[in-house]
Image (tube, rainbow, N blue to C red):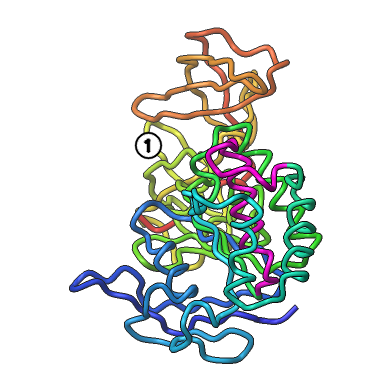
Amino acid sequence: MKNFIHFHDVSKSFGMTKVVENLDLEVEKGEFLSLLGPSGSGKTTILMMLAGFENATSGTIRMDGERIEDLPPHKRGIGVVFQNYALFPHMTIAENVAFPLQMRRLGKAETQERVARALDRVRLGHLSERRPDQLSGGQQQRVALTRALVFEPKVVLMDEPLGALDKQLREEMQLEIRELHRQLGLTIVFVTHDQGEALTMSNRIAIFDKGRISQIGTASRVYDHPENAFVAQFIGETNLLPAKVERRDGERLLIDLGEGARLEAEGPAGLEPGASVMLSVRPERLHLRPQAESNAIEAGVDDVVYQGDHLRLHLSRGALRFVARCERTAVPPALGSRTWLSAAPADCAVFPA
């Protein structure tokens, strides 16, 4: 694989407001990259600059080695899928899908062949003569996706494409997009604020905060090894607790959480005794134990919530609050009882406060 898209030192401002700042980002050919972040973090603006709908304030954008900042959108070879589908209501489904081919002046026979093949691929061939308002939301989104793919673009950009669908349809479309990505070898840049969606679909995830990349890596990397408190808290659920470093022994830290609670953790260089830190441990990495053992904290059981495939436990020790998860088949401790929470040092991430 090779780097196919390259943002180099790209910034974008709207008036006095800088929404993207000094972005350096590379996308490999055939990659599924998700841009994940809260509203206002700059991810959609990045997509619009790549598509040509917004101009960068500074920096360069290259595709396949060529600068594209001055190319109009229709000459970039990019397909775009929006959340609101953007289908033409007065056209049939076949006419909607044919539109980008007609704009590129393909012959009638080839256009009809491509449209038929593309609609059959997403199992909509039998609906080709219907209009958009005669389709379900999921079907309309498949038409929008097909229209973006039919002219064989170099890159497909998706801006919150599944946000308007209900949970079941959204999960079905996630599988469908993943399958198309594998079948066609597409390069996809996918914008979402849904952490689960990004974890499910991506080769890599770039997590944005205030116009900058906080971390980029595989789904397992950013989830299991967050590099800062923002990433730990934003992607998935975590127990994020203020603490102090009590002792350092190589890479191993002894963390004082207050309330008489201490945990060993693995932390970055530069954190010395007395440093204020944040400790992060995922709920599923906290293990309930009936008695004291290495690297464990005693806590009281405040609530046990049944959530279908697992049990969610709320626990406390003085002012400290914890959330833990266990299998639905487990016998949870009784409300008001005391239990021990154990965590491996490698599962406890420590960040500067």
Going by the picture, which residue comes out furthest to the front? 108
Picture coordinates of residue 233, whole percent (x, y) = 45, 46
Span of residues in magenta: 127-153
Picture coordinates of residue 257, whole percent (x, y) = 41, 39
The residue type indicated by label 1 comes to: Gly
Residue 106 magenta: no
**Could you tell me if residue 295 is visible in this image?**
no
Q: Is residue 345 above or below residue 351?
A: above
Specify the quadrant that holds the N terminus.
Answer: bottom right
Q: Is residue 38 rendered to the left or right of residue 189?
A: left
Q: Residue at x 58, y 15 (%)?
A: 306
Q: In which quarter of the image is residue 113?
A: bottom right
Residue 131 magenta: yes
Assess disc 1: are there few (<14), some (14-19) or many (≥20) residues with their C-alpha within 10 Å of its C-alpha: some
Q: Which residue is drawn at 69% across and 22% down?
A: 327
Q: Residue at x 66, y 54 (%)?
A: 94
Q: Which residue is drawn at 32% across and 82% down?
A: 57
Pick the front one: 177 or 142:
142
Q: Is residue 272 above or below residue 236?
A: below
Tell me the residue that label 1 is attached to. Answer: 258
Pick the front one: 108 or 47:
108
Q: Which element is circle 1 on? A: strand
Picture coordinates of residue 271, whole percent (x, y) = 44, 62
Q: Is residue 258 above or below residue 17?
A: above
